[in-house]
Amino acid sequence: MKRNVLIAMFTCLAVVSSLMALPPAVSIKEWDVPTPKSRPHDPALAPDGSLWYTGQMANKLGRLDPKTGEFKEYPLKTADSGPHGLVADRDGNIWFTAIFKGYVGKLNPKTGEIVEYHMTDPRVRDPHTPAIDPQGNVWFTTEQSNFIGRIDPQSGEIKVKEVPTPHAVPYGIVINSKGVPYFCEFGSNKLASVDPRTLEITEYTMPEGARPRRLALAADGTIYYSDYARGFLGHFDPATKKQEEWPSPGGPASKPYGIAVAPNGMVWYSESGISPNTLVQFDPKSRKFSSTTIPSGGGVVRNMVATPDGRLYLACSGVNKVAVAEIH
């Protein structure tokens, strides 16, 4: 009897050991953004390596040079725009979503000029997260309006498409190498893709109860998502439709949120329900997790981006900081 109990105990330990690895050597450097109570919402990587962020409550975009620690802020021309998501195009222009005022903006950092693209359909009120396809078109989700949109920067034309599932809450978005956008429906247990020619939307059902909030694209074209509601890391292969998921180390209440895939294939995401927030690494080959505490606590890392040299840019919204994680 005792022997059976011991065998069971060692089996359980082996299972836990197979899921957890030694923490990676991670150093996280944080900077206070210049304007108090800015609520840095999302980070972005510019072609020159600078870290950009949206100061949602300050009505500003900000730029950090991680090498020098120098900041520069760019006030928006429309008051209370509520800048939310942002992304840099190949020329270094910064595209951002103004979730409070219902437009998508483009900042030229060299001149400070801002161009606003206002929605032509009155039903589209809250552009949320932007992404740029290989042709330079700007795609965006709308959270409560339940639309996906596309802007042609050359002509300024805006096209939108309503999501088939009511109250789907389109949220995070990525675009693969073929120019196909994929987005998550935070209000349901679905991911979806958009035909870039027709804007037709195809939905894919994830496990019951899942609430995918952010997406990250792997080099092989597969997609990882943070399941905010259930405390899981999910994986979806668009080619085979195969789905996988793993419980996050912090448990069901860990609220996985911002997520990115590094050039070496490692998946990184933040557990926003853990205090202090953690930065979690997942190795797709060994399927092991490891966690690192964010020094300031994070205050909810809503999004993150991986750089070509393997660093991570973070916006720590609740503590008014941005951060760079170095993986050693």
Image: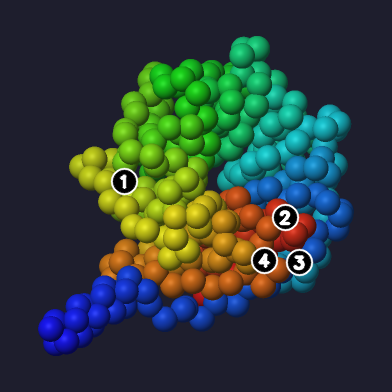
Q: Horizontally, is 286 left or right of 296 in the view?
A: left
Name the residue carrying label 4.
Answer: 297
Q: Crowding near pointer 1: few (<14 within 10 Å), some, many (20+)?
A: many
Report which residue position mark 3 lands on: 31
Residue at mark 3 to residue at mark 1: CA–CA distance = 35 Å
Q: Quadrant of residue 238?
A: top left
**CA distance for labels 4 and 2:** 9 Å
Q: Is residue 22 left or right of residue 240?
A: right
Q: Do the residues labelled 4 and 3 touch (CB within 8 Å)?
A: no
Amino acid type shown at disc 2: Gly
Q: Which of marks 3 and 2 is nearer the N terminus?
A: 3
**Nearest-to-viewer mark from 4 and 1:** 4
Residue at (36, 50) in percent of width and height: 234
Q: Is mark 2 on a helix, strand or loop?
A: helix
Mark 3: give few (<14), some (14-19) or many (20+) Cα within 10 Å: some
Which secondary structure lies at badge 4? loop
State the separation of the CA atoms marked 4 and 1: 30 Å
Circle 4/circle 2 CB separation < 8 Å: yes
Q: Do the residues labelled 3 and 2 touch (CB within 8 Å)?
A: no
What number is the disc on residue 318? 2
Label 4 or label 3, whichever comes before in sequence order: 3
- Where is 255 relative to 132, above or below? below
Look at 42% across and 22% down and name the residue there. 165
Q: Check disc 3 and give the amino acid type.
A: Trp
Residue named by callout 1: 236
> Mark 2 Cα within 10 Å, few/some/many (few <14, many 20+)?
some
Q: Which amino acid does label 1 sit on?
A: Phe
